[in-house]
Image (spheres, rainbow, N blue to C red):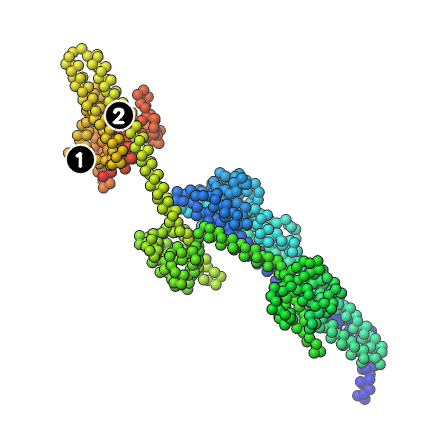
Amino acid sequence: MQLEDNRYHIHWFYNHPYLLSTLTFVVVFGLSFLIAQKDLWINQEKEAHKATETLQEVEGKIDQILKSSYVTTLSIALTIDDNGKPKNFNTVAEKLFNSNPNIDGIELVPDGVIKYVYPYEKHKGAIGLNVLDYEYSKTEAKKSIESGKMFFAGPLKFKQGGFGIIGRLPVYADDGFWGFSAVMINLETFLEKSGIQNLADEGYNYRFTKINPNTGEREIFNDNNSEDFDFSKAEKIVVEDAEWEIYLGQDNSHKAFIAASPFLIFGLFLAFGCALLTYVVLQRPAQLQRYIKLQTAKLLNSEIKYKAIFQEAGMSIIHLDENEKFIEANPKFLSKTGYTIDELKGERFSKFLQLQDDSFKKLLNYDKFEGKLICKRGLKKIVRVTNSALEVNHQITHILLIEDVTKRKKSEKKLKDLQDRMQMAIRISKLAYWDWEPEKGKIRWSDRMYKIFDIDKNQKLDSDTLSNRVHPEDFEKYKQDLKRILETKEGTTLEHRILDTNNKLKHILTRVECETSENGIFKVKGTTVDQTDKKEAMINLQHSYQMVVEQNERLLNFSYIVSHNLRSHSSNIQGLIHLIRDLETFEEKKEMFNLLEEVTISLDETLTDLNEVIHIQKSDGGLVEEITLKPFLQRIKNILKREIKCNNITITENIPEGEQLKFNPAYLESVLLNIISNAIKYRDKQRNSEINLIFSETEEFKILQIKDNGIGIDLDSYKGQIFGMYETFTDFKNSRGIGLFVTNNQMKALGGKIEIESELNKGSVFTLYFKK
């Protein structure tokens, strides 16, 4: 009974060949479909991984562009001297420009106004532009100032023409914000150098975007702007220093379907073959066993090939025997090299691979190696080869995965060349760089840092290494600066003096930046430059300049004294001569002759003082001497005796006996003559004229106030012109506008100053400050 049941089942199979072949087709095709789906998923993962790597490569190139731009802006900012003027801008800018192929221009922007550009002819149209007011740049320029860091604005429209990116580094001087040091990068240059331009050539759908700071709308800066881009599904990187967002879409997912389709087609034919085989087997029971064995062997062989293709689909793959001879190569390898499979079969793979290291005698003994793949037309591509050995039926074959790394190697070489040029730029600018991890106490210096501080490279570095070198007078400021940096974790620019091993004074300028890594490690880093020579040159220059200014002031004042003081005496003499001519009695004439004698004596004294000034200037001696104030004032009143008497002027003094001033006599005579004679000249004829002289003093100055009740000056209208040359404030025909100008210059020349208070129709108060 059991045997009959078995036969029944066997005959049932033989009696239903269509059903069984259909089931076989469904099962085999279902398995093939699952395998194809798995392969599709793997290909999609690889495409996603490749997209991520591509974005990372672009991000790395952008980072290098931004860093090189930062070094350039920092280097050009160091040309700014203590007066806020750049030194050798064109020379330094030319060297930096030639050493940095990533930029198209360099700017210095004091107070937000572009004044210095390089190359000049290309960017001269931007000179005079106030970036803090310009509609396309003001928002991001102010953002750079607020952050205190370099910020890359744009892409935006350049004032001088063109479209691109501007990286601005805010520069600060002792009195605050100085302006910007900036670089300009054309958009085409940036897209080329960053690799963004190549994304479309590699089959990617991408978006280079930014939120416009003025409109708040997203702007897109690449040409392939198809409207079916899904930002939510795209890979994304963000460049924080410029607020750029770069999206890479997965629009090339059809490649994964194409790559998986051979498996699906293969599965379809395999399923059809298996179904047909099942049908034939069921139709021919006598040949079933032999046929099954044959098909099993073929299926096993197909499975080996299928698994190899499945595991590494989407890459160049070749199948070699143990003697390195080609068995099979996938279409991608053939398309890259230009060979056909017939041309490769029987050839050794080593014939097509040029190795840099001759130690590789037998390739298949190594798991990984690199070399140059020789293509059909002599083109050579740098490849990285991964070798996997397979053993089937005691026969060893090899599956080689070949990755084209030509572009990567070129990028690495360009990066190395850029780093070399950056190092050269650093050496030319004599910049030293360093970093410090306060929590771990790790300090790293460049060779230039050791040279600046005159420290042996083998010496262990710690936080006291630098503080021990700081000049004692700068030590407290150094500690406060360091404390502020560690508390605020914000970058800044510092200037200190240090003493080297030989106790030689050096001036150093340091730019400090702070950063916190993703794992929470706080790091302080920056650059330092020795500006001792620059400082000493500036001190010598300022000293020489001050000497020239003082000499010019002395010459100018002397000429004013000669022309102005002698004019007062000559006017008095002429006036007395006219009076003598008009007088009739001998007594009146005698009195006038006495006045004339006093005036001539004063004139002689003035000439003597002027001669003494010349003598003092020639002998380089001091211009200042002790002058007893009250007798000197009496001398002034004698000079002006005629005017005082004729105009009925009352002069009162509140000056202690024996009070002395340290001043030049000729200057003092000129100052007092100017002010008192003006008080007489501009008296109010409607009331009795009074002149009051009051003395006081402070810790720094001795003060003499000269008050009058004359016609006064409208300070609201003329306040900024009071001490100007040839400035007059009345309709008097003899007014020349020289007196107060001379007086102001004479007071300043000897460290003093003059102030004025005045009100129309009430009078004026001149306050003279003499240094003690």
Q: Which image quarter holds the N terminus?
A: bottom right
User: Residue at image x 34%, y 40%?
Assistant: 544
- Which residue is outermost to the front? 358
* Image side of residue 615 versus residue 228, left or right: left
Crowd around label 1: few <14 · some 14–19 · many ≥20 (10 Å): some
Query: Is residue 423 in sight in this rendering?
Result: yes
The image quarter in which residue 47 lies: bottom right
- Amino acid found under the numbered disc labelled 1: Glu
Q: Residue 39: where, in percent of width, then height?
A: 68, 67
Q: Residue 240: where, in percent of width, then height?
A: 51, 54
Q: Residue 646: where, in percent of width, then height?
A: 21, 19
Q: Distance from label 2 to label 1 (Cα)?
A: 25 Å
Q: Residue 567: where, in percent of width, then height?
A: 27, 22
Q: Secondary structure at mark 2?
A: helix
N-terminal-most mark, 2 or 1: 2
Which residue is the site of mark 2?
Answer: 565
User: Residue at image x 49%, y 53%?
Assistant: 424
User: Residue at image x 46%, y 59%?
Assistant: 516
- Amino acid found under the numbered disc labelled 2: Asn
Which residue is the site of mark 1?
Answer: 659
- Which residue is outermost to the bottom? 1
The image quarter in which residue 666 lies: top left
Which residue is more in the foreground, 144 or 59? 59
